[in-house]
Amino acid sequence: MADRKYRFDTIIVHSGIQPENWLGSTLPPIFQTASHRVATAEGLSDLFAGKEKGFIYQRLHNPTNQALENRIAQLEGGVGAIVTSSGMAAIHNSLTAIAKNGDEVISGNSLFMSTYLLFANVFRRFGIDVKFVESTDIDEFERSITPRTKAIFVESVGNPKMDVPDIERLAAIAHKNDVPLVVDNTMPTPYLLNPFNLGADIVVHSTTKYLSGHGDALGGVIVDSGNFPWPNEKFPDFEVSKERADKKAYLDKVWREIHINVGATQSPFHSYLTMLGIDTLAVRMERHVVNTDKIVRFMTEHRKVKWVNHPSLKSSPSYGVAKKQFSKGCCALFTFGLADQRECFDFIRNLKLVYHLANLGDCKTLAIHPYSSQYVSFDPATRMRLGITPGMIRVSVGIEDAEDIIEDFDQALNKL
Ligand SMILES: Cc1ncc(COP(=O)(O)O)c(C=O)c1O
């Protein structure tokens, strides 16, 4: 790969693959071992001291995980990555390496349910105060920053509010205030958006979704752009030892202080499945986007549908930013409105092809009623702020023939 510059779709298929180190295998071997035997005590001491590179114990490093880390880092254009057991672990570890008791994080309020609860409840317990602001209101982000602020966090497309923050403008505000911008890029994937090109400093993903792509492997990843100037006045305790004073200083901190001690480690088998999934990322995302376009258009015209929300629609408040930020399509999730919760439940019952389950980013089309499921324990005011209404259905568009999905939605709607 190093001898010439390949195009992105080729890099997707070949990145992170090392047949020369894998007995010619073009797929990463699954190193299903908790620990690695080391010949001498001197050798193990050198590994622990970081004087030699190698593998010790799965919670620290694993060769299959490393192949996936190399692949995703390359796709996002970062200097390195750390895979985790889930997307939530990636979000937790990425921010707790930066913020501690007494610090603040400013986050867009358009968030996946568990991210919201992690910030509102768990971080607060540890003294990290997360201020929620309107994800698309750049001025509100700027107004909310104080000397205690250590990071800005947004989802590149909010799940399920379907709003799109202006990453370039947010990055400028973050950098003016000497803090990094952390972006959850799960929804577009690096195929549709590279936040680092817009100035973001750290990217996280739930690889459970489009990256693995088949609804089979829970996982997450933290990717470092290598561009944030650690340490600075805001991060006086951000120790960068001489050996580590390279572009991976942030990842080293995540790894040393949080990752290996929290232990939310990716399973090598899941890394293997995600490597396989990523091979087809380009063709899947292309189809996801084409199908979404067709289905969203059909839904906007259906007499039973009250409204449809997707950033590609002129009716979306995020239409302008999405048009500027995405050139190949924005994402394959959308929401639509029916009369009330009763109609939503009936619609779900009427579905024959589309699966009703709590996930997104699968090859198969999925539908869910967020108000009564993921968000059932949220108080009504918070649900409204997050854009979760009783009459809303969320759809994750799959890669089946779009006509079959449309026919299934049509028959389910017409029975209402
Ligand atoms: C945007 C986003 N980020 C993070 C997560 C959490 O990922 P995981 O379920 O892999 O922990 C999800 C899950 O749906 C998500 O949609």
Image (tube, grey):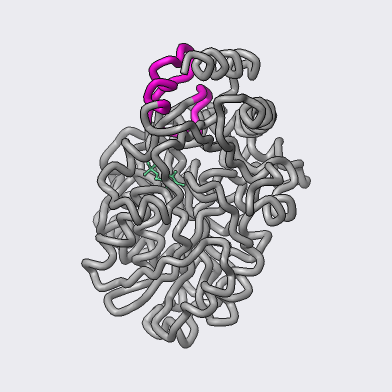
Is 175 placed above or below 261 here?
Answer: below
Q: Is residue 411 left or right of residue 1?
A: left
At which x and y percent is residue 218? 38, 36
139 vs 81, nearest the viewer: 139
At which x and y percent is residue 1? 69, 42
> In this view, which residue lies farthest toward the left?
125
At which x and y percent is residue 8? 71, 42
Residue at 47%, 26% in the rendered image: 366
Is 49 placed above or below 214 here?
Answer: below
Q: Is residue 283 left or right of residue 149?
A: right
At which x and y percent is residue 96? 34, 66
Is 405 placed above or below 299 here?
Answer: above
Residue at 58%, 74% in the rendered image: 139
Q: Is residue 90 visible?
A: yes
Q: Which residues are magenta?
A: 343-365
154 vs 234, nearest the viewer: 154
Q: Is residue 24 visible?
A: no
Q: Is residue 21 left or right of residue 89?
A: right
Q: Quadrant of residue 106?
A: bottom left
346 vs 145, nearest the viewer: 346
In the image, residue 333 lies in the stretch drawn in magenta? no
Residue at 39%, 53% in the rendered image: 90
